Amino acid sequence: MKVSDESMEKINVNLLYPVYKEIVEKLGMEAVLGVHALFKGIQVNFPTRLFDPIEIKKTILDEYDGTNVNQLAIKYEYSERTIRRMIKESDKKMC
């Protein structure tokens, strides 16, 4: 359904499903219409983490310099223990 800018202003937000109301509040009606157009009829589950763990691991290994575990943990929102485990696992694979 193509909605003009004028029609967007006339949409009664109170008639929307709660999830769409929340998106309107955070991102605006245009975002709701875009999400609806892309995903209508489909159940969508958003992962807790934003980044793909396989790609993050590759990036962490590329950025690891032997001294920056803390910085990587903060940057990618992983614990230092998890960063060290990723590095250790990659070292085992290289042997």
Image (tube, rainbow, N blue to C red):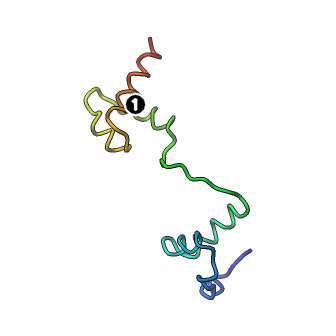
Q: Which residue is drawn at the image coordinates 31% and 35% (left, top)?
A: 80
Quadrant of the snapshot with the C terminus: top left
- Give the answer, above or below, for where 62 lies relative to 21: above
Quadrant occupied by the N terminus: bottom right
Where, by quadrant of the figure, is residue 39 drawn? bottom right
**Residue at which label 1 appears:** 62
Q: State the SS at label 1.
A: helix
Q: Is residue 7 above or below residue 62?
A: below
Residue 50, position in %: x, y? 48, 49
* In the depicted structure, whether residue 40 falls above or below residue 75: below
Vertical arrangement, residue 38 with respect to residue 45, above or below: below
**The one of 19 and 83 positioned closer to us in this rendering:** 19
Q: Is residue 54 left or right of residue 2?
A: left
Q: Give the side of residue 3 with respect to residue 46, left or right.
A: right
The structure residue drawn at horizontal position 34% and vertical position 30%, both measured from the top left corner, is 64
Residue 33 in the image: x percent, y percent?
A: 64, 72
Residue drawn at the location 48% of the way across and 47% of the way down? 49
Q: Amino acid at mark 1?
A: Asp
Q: Position of residue 38 (x, y in %)?
A: 68, 62
